[in-house]
């Protein structure tokens, strides 16, 4: 027998409406000393109008873990499918403050 205690596994539920996902083509990140807010926005093509589709608020520590997870996944993606080109486009218009 092993003396090591087995870690309990985390069971995560995924509702059908959440499983469908939400498309966003712009993200706005803001922070305070206590939290990081990620707003995922869909901007209509050819229009200067967008709508926040989802807002996620996390701790700074979790934001850093998310940063590392994204970096790792993008690197794996590029190893499989090739480098993701970043097009040099004119800067987007300034995002007007919203609530």
Image (cartoon, helix red, strand yellow):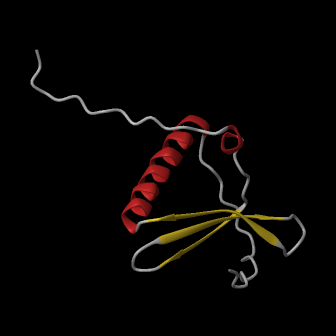
**Closer to the camera in the image, 8 or 28:** 8
Say above or below: 9 vs 72. above
Q: Using the image as rendered, state which of residue 60 and residue 99 is in the foreground.
A: 99
Residue at 54% across / 37% down in the picture?
13
Residue 55 is situated, as x and y percent measured from the top left of the image, at 62, 64
Q: How many marks?
A: 0
Side of 3 where 17 appears, left or right: right
Q: Is residue 73 left or right of residue 47?
A: left
- Please tell me which residue is depicted at 45% across the width and 80% down the height of the picture: 32
x%, y% of residue 7? 26, 33
Residue at the image point whose x is 9% and y is 24% from the top: 3
Q: Which quarter of the figure is the C terminus placed in?
A: bottom right
Residue 17 position by quadrant: top right
The quarter of the displayed image where residue 50 is located: bottom right
Above or below for 87 versus 82: below
User: Percent from the top left, x then y, of residue 85?
Assistant: 65, 54
């Amino acid at each position: 027998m092993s003396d090591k205690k087995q870690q309990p596994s985390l069971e995560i539920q995924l509702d059908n409406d959440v499983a469908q996902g939400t498309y966003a083509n712009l993200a706005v990140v803001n922070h305070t000393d206590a939290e990081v807010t990620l707003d995922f926005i869909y901007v209509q093509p050819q229009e200067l109008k967008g709508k926040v589709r989802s807002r996620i608020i996390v701790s700074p520590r979790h934001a850093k873990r998310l940063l590392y997870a994204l970096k790792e996944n993008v690197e794996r993606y590029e190893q499989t499918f090739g480098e993701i080109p970043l097009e040099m486009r004119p800067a987007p218009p300034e995002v007007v403050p919203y609530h």
